[in-house]
Amino acid sequence: MATSRFTAMVQSKCPKCRVGKVFEGPVYGFKKQKMHEHCPHCGLKFEVEPGYFYAAMYVSYAFSVGEVVTLGLTTAMLTKSESPWVYVSVLFAAILIFAPFNLRYSRLVLLHYLSPKIVYNPAYQERLDKEID
């Protein structure tokens, strides 16, 4: 059965085969996040061209803006505080907490949705399904 693009992205799977993992380990942990250079299943090179992941900074920025606006408004509604230090502390903590998430998923969004050179090939997943059966 074919894995959807969104499910593959959430599970950190390769955009070409949707089987191999893009990152080693979980989003949050004591070890630094490590991204595979090539897909362990189909061999796709993730960094399509030199400096490719600089574009992920824009996706990460969009994630950060959404998180900061949402948390800022939520803090305003819940606390009704006029102190800027309340907002600064909440937003600073949120940026630190969401940084690993933003790093991983900005790269995955770039690979899955914003890379026209990378096309899903269901043959990789069909071959894996046949091997399992």
Image: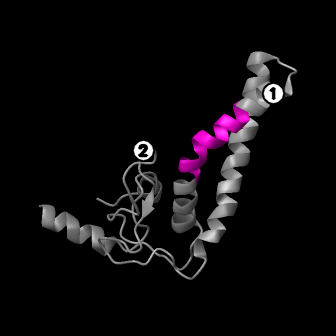
In the drawing, does residue 95 fall left or right of residue 12? right
Q: Taking 70 as reference, is 111 above or below it? A: below
Of the 4 image quadrants, the one containing the C terminus is bottom left
* Residue 40 as seen in the image, left or right of residue 113: left
Q: Which residue is mark 1?
A: 85
Q: Amino acid at mark 1?
A: Trp
Is there a contact, CB below 8 Å, between mark 1 and mark 2? no
First along the sequence among labels 1 and 2: 2
67 part of magenta stretch: no
Looking at the rendering, the stretch of residues picked out in magenta corresponds to 90-102
Q: Where does label 2 land, which residue?
A: 29
Q: Residue at x 69, y 62 (%)?
A: 58
- Alpha carbons under labels 1 and 2: distance apart: 29 Å
Q: Nearer the viewer, residue 15 or 1?
A: 15
Specify the farthest residue to the right.
82
Q: Position of residue 68 (x, y in %)?
A: 73, 40
Q: Residues within 10 Å of mark 1 (few under 14, many from 20)?
A: few
Amino acid on which the number 2 mark rests in the picture: Gly
**Above or below — where is 8 with respect to 50?**
above
